Image (cartoon, rainbow, N blue to C red):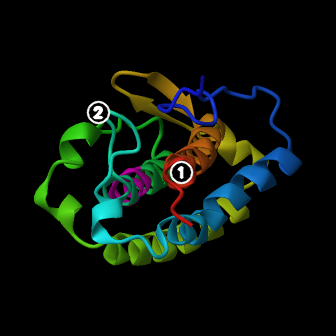
């Protein structure tokens, strides 16, 4: 039986990064806005407000969460690239998903993702291999290398799009 929380499986870190693997992970980040837009294309409000699993978020909340989460990650990358081992501020993602702006139409977050991911992709594509070794400190997760964060967010892109596309498939929403 499929675990609806992790349609692609839980994140696993690849300790053997290569330029080719990084290019693929950067492509996942580059491609997220188009995949997210396609995942929700044509959905009516009632469908956008259908949780992908019992107790899970709706496609609307997932799209807004992607914008929230990826804005935070982009800032974390920039902090790690410009400061020595900065401590980042975590955020309560579940509570953010319940704030009033998470009830807006998805177009504002899709547009935000397009601009954000264009900038993030440009930044990531210009980094030298040694820059992926730079770190930030997460108060709960400890020291994190940018290489690992890149992998996490490449997975995060695919993970949340799969929540929506698999919901569509289960419901028969073409």
Question: Can residue 142 be seen?
Answer: yes
- Residue 30 point in image, percent of width and height: 64, 66
Q: Magenta residues?
A: 64-72
Helix, strand or loop at label 2? It is loop
Check the image and name the residue furthest to the left: 100
N-terminal of the pair, mark 2 or mark 1, is 2
Q: Is residue 71 magenta?
A: yes
Label the magenta part by its dominant secondary structure: helix
Residue for point 34% across, 71% down: 106
- In the picture of the structure, the residue carrying the numbered disc 1 is 81
- Nearest the eye: 84 or 15: 15
User: How far separated are the C-alphas under marks 2 and 1?
Assistant: 37 Å
In this view, the residue in front, 168 or 77, is 168
Residue 36 locus on image (x, y percent):
52, 64
Residue on which the image places disc 2: 55
Q: Nearer the viewer, residue 102 or 171?
A: 171
From the viewer's perspective, is residue 20 above or below residue 103?
above
Left or right? Give the position of 156 relative to 130: left
115 vs 168, nearest the viewer: 168
> Quarter-wise, where is residue 108 in the image?
bottom left
Foreground tag (2 vs 1): 2
Q: Helix, strand or loop at disc 1?
A: helix
Choose top left, top right, bottom left or bottom right for residue 127: bottom right
Q: Residues within 10 Å of mark 2 (few under 14, many from 20)?
A: few
């Amino acid at each position: 039986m499929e675990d609806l929380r992790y349609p692609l499986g839980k994140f696993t870190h690849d300790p053997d990064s290569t330029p080719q693997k990084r290019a693929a992970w950067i492509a996942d980040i580059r491609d997220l806005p188009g995949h997210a837009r396609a995942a929700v294309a044509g959905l009516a409000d009632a469908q956008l407000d259908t949780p992908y699993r019992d107790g899970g978020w709706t496609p609307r909340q997932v799209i807004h969460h992607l914008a929230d989460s990826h804005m935070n990650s982009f800032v974390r990358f920039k902090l790690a690239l410009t400061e020595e081992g900065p401590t980042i501020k975590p955020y309560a993602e579940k509570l953010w998903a319940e704030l009033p702006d998470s009830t807006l139409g998805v177009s504002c977050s899709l547009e935000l993702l397009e601009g954000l991911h264009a900038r993030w992709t440009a930044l990531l594509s210009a980094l030298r291999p040694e820059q992926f070794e730079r770190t930030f400190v997460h108060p709960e997760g400890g020291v994190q290398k940018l290489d690992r964060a890149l992998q996490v967010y490449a997975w995060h892109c695919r993970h949340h799009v799969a929540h929506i596309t698999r919901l569509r498939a289960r419901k028969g929403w073409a």
